[in-house]
Amino acid sequence: MVRQGWLHAALLLLSTADLALAFSPMLPKFPTPAARRAVVAQASTSTLTMMAKASEPTPVPKHLKGKKLLGLGIAAVDFIATVDAYPEPDAKIRSTSLSVMGGGNAANSLTACRRLGVECSLLTKLGADDNGDLIRKELNGDGVDTGLCVSKAGLDSPFTYILVDTSTQTRTCIHTPIQEDLTPDEIPDDVLDGVSVLHLDGRNTLAAAHLAAMANKAKVPVLLDIEKVRPDIEKVLPLADYIITNTGYPKIFKEGGSTEEGMAALLEHGRAKFVITTLGSEGSQMMRRKEDDPKDKVKDPSLSYSSHEDYTIVKCKAHKPKKIVDTTGAGDSFIGAMLYGLVTGMPTENAMLLASVVAATKCSGPGARSALPMRSDIDEKLL
């Protein structure tokens, strides 16, 4: 039975302890549309926030017309419960707020980039269900094109339960993926027409490897976001022109090595021109071959330079938000800004400075997208 998006929202309203109920694949449907509307109406008078979207999509500046970002990866619905502290085993606690918003790595990154003014299209697989409709609607509201998304009856669109712990400013994610990946034969032959940069979020790996090979042949740069070992990801890694990882992946890629050794191993594994590792509150660091260094260093107090063997390391301090509400999707927003830098031809260090500001701004609101900045919110000097 296909799981219903409205029912998940209703279950989360009860208490965070009731999350266990949502794991059953045999959840009943609300009997009528009126019953579903009643649940949402009741929730809207309390602590439930439904979806986050821009009032109007960001206009595409003249100098960016004709440039386009294509992303292949996950789009999901996030059910975000905020709690005062993460529960102990078998505890019963209450959430202080609940938000139902769009999520998923690729979808989040494309939304961030679209709000900065770049035309974006998403390629993914969704179920022909309520959650799939919500996912498309929110992305379309931000101006992200979902015309390439494949919808299939009988599948459940991805969703994630997220517990935000305000005492530690951390979040815990419980993700339920769609039952099957996008496949290579579901990718149109002309999908790269007019595309300036291709983004892959490490999901749908066989389709991603196929599309990355197409991009290499068409000379379309490929940025890969990778955070963990996934089936067949080794087929994608050598095809990436740029790689962004979370804090842990370099040490996974080079078992027993340091972060810097893992980043260097990733550079040597394929054709990547740089590897960037996000470091949470410590910012980010980029590694590239010294032979690829620009003639002039970007001078900024947030940047520092060092070396590791034959590589240059550039560290970028984290921009400090006025208030941290939720770190969900901070890495995705950082990647969205780096994609903006690639599409526009921005020097890598400048893109890192922009990405630091975008990620910090995102953390000032709940969920992955509610506080993503619009182009008009960003200092023009950073763009």
Image: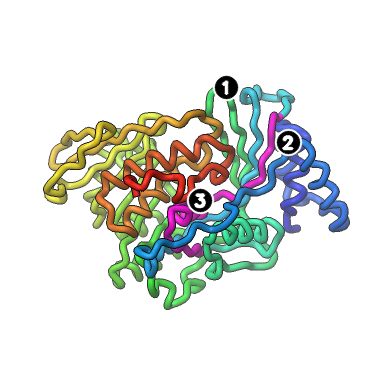
Based on the picture, tell me whether residue 113 belongs to the magenta stretch.
yes
Q: Amino acid at mark 1?
A: Ser
Q: Amino acid at mark 2?
A: Thr
Q: Relative to 3, is 32 on the left or the right?
A: right
Q: Disc 2 and disc 3: Cα gap in Å?
A: 23 Å
- The residue tagged 3 is 108
At 73% from the left and 54% from the top, the residue drawn is 3
At 54% from the left and 42% from the top, the residue drawn is 371
Up-down relation of residue 208 to residue 168 (above or below): below
Q: Relative to 381, is 90 on the left or the right?
A: right
Q: Residues within 10 Å of mark 3 (few under 14, many from 20)?
A: many
Based on the picture, tell me whether residue 20 belongs to the magenta stretch.
no
- Give the extent of the magenta segment: 95-123
Q: Disc 2 and disc 1: Cα gap in Å?
A: 19 Å
Q: Residues within 10 Å of mark 2 (few under 14, many from 20)?
A: some
Kindly give the residue lying farthest to the bottom in the view shown: 189
